[in-house]
Amino acid sequence: MIDCTRLELDGVRYVILRESVFQQLCEQAGVLSGETAEDDAGAFSPALGLDRTSLAEKLTRRRVAVGLSQAELARQAGIRAETLNRIERGRTTPDFATVRKLVVAMNAAERQRAADATNLSKQQGD
């Protein structure tokens, strides 16, 4: 059994595991792993399919769709608004703990929005 953490971001599921385990799996599969550490620009490896730009775009799109300001999402996630601003502008790549806080806060906001829409629909149907 492989020790890993699962994460969903913008409807895409990811698995986070130790780099040594990832390297071993790549070797066993006979594939090149690409760079797993940050490159000189500080972005994630393209092999991961999640670089600063795509993370920033997905996060911003979800936040706007739910109707949250950066300050509101930052407060709900328990991070500084300045940190969220830098993430959304692609100026920094968050660590796993920060991504997890943002995902949890976004999921909660999306559930609340869906519940509000359902309640409004029921009220209008009465």
Image (cartoon, grey):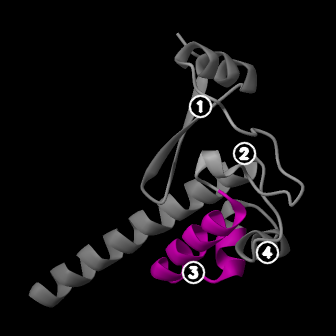
From the image, tell me which residue sits under label 2. 96
Q: Viewer-nearest of labels 2 and 3?
A: 2
Marked residue nearer the N-terminal end (4 or 1): 1
Marked residue nearer the N-terminal end (2 or 1): 1
- Residue 20 in view, yes or no: yes
Does the magenta run of residues contain 72? yes
Marked residue nearer the N-terminal end (3 or 4): 3
Going by the numbered disc 4, the residue's amino acid type is Ala
Does the magenta run of residues contain 98? no
User: Is residue 69 toward the left or the right of residue 123 in the image?
Assistant: right
Label 4 and label 2: CA atoms lie apart by 17 Å
From the image, tell me which residue sits under label 4. 81
From the image, tell me which residue sits under label 3. 68
User: Is residue 11 toward the left or the right of residue 117 in the image?
Assistant: right
Marked residue nearer the N-terminal end (3 or 1): 1
From the image, tell me which residue sits under label 1. 5
Going by the numbered disc 1, the residue's amino acid type is Thr
User: Is residue 68 toward the left or the right of residue 39 in the image?
Assistant: left
Mark 3 neighbour density, 10 Å: few (under 14) some (14–19) many (20 or more): some
Query: Over which residues does the magenta segment extend?
Result: 51-74
Mark 4 neighbour density, 10 Å: few (under 14) some (14–19) many (20 or more): some
Name the residue rendered at 58%, 26% in the picture.
Answer: 31
